[in-house]
Image (tube, rainbow, N blue to C red):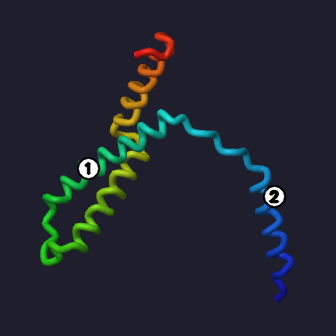
Amino acid sequence: MDISGNVTLAMAQGQAQIANREPAATPDPAQTAARDFEAVFLTQVMEEMLKTVNMGTMDGGFAEDTWRSFLARAYADELASRGSTGIAESVERSIGAYRAAMAENGGRT
């Protein structure tokens, strides 16, 4: 069974789709900063919460500390990506209000 023609066709179709894709919009720096702040804040919250979890016989040591920090960051990133806490939106609104005040005052604080 010769599949070389199918592979070539699939590669050509894939390259055409990539070439026709719209360029990604540049995210607003305020939105990016707000999401990053939310993720860092939630990471700290998760790290504190995970300190209260008893791991049984696996409790303690450097490996657990490392694992818990990765787990805390993963949970925090997931929560931040859902936008369910409202932290990023609040921070973004604050940045927008600051920008508006700066524009109103000609860049002076």
Residue 17, horizontal then vertical, whole percent: 77, 56
Residue furthest front in the image: 108
Q: How many marks?
A: 2
For the point 13% across and 73% down, the residue is 56
Residue 90, horizontal then vertical, whole percent: 37, 29
Residue furthest top in the image: 105
Residue 63, horizontal then vertical, whole percent: 25, 74
Residue 65, compared with residue 87, is above or below; it is below
For the point 47% across and 21% down, the residue is 99
Residue furthest bottom in the image: 1
Foreground: 14 or 69?
A: 69
Please name the residue that numbered disc 1 is placed on: 44
Pointer 1 local density, CA inside 10 Å: few below 14, some 14–19, many at least 20 = some
Tell me the amino acid under the disc marked 1. Answer: Gln
Tell me the amino acid under the disc marked 2. Answer: Ala
Q: Which disc, if any, is residue 31?
A: none
Please name the residue that numbered disc 2 is placed on: 16
Residue 53 appears left or right of 16: left
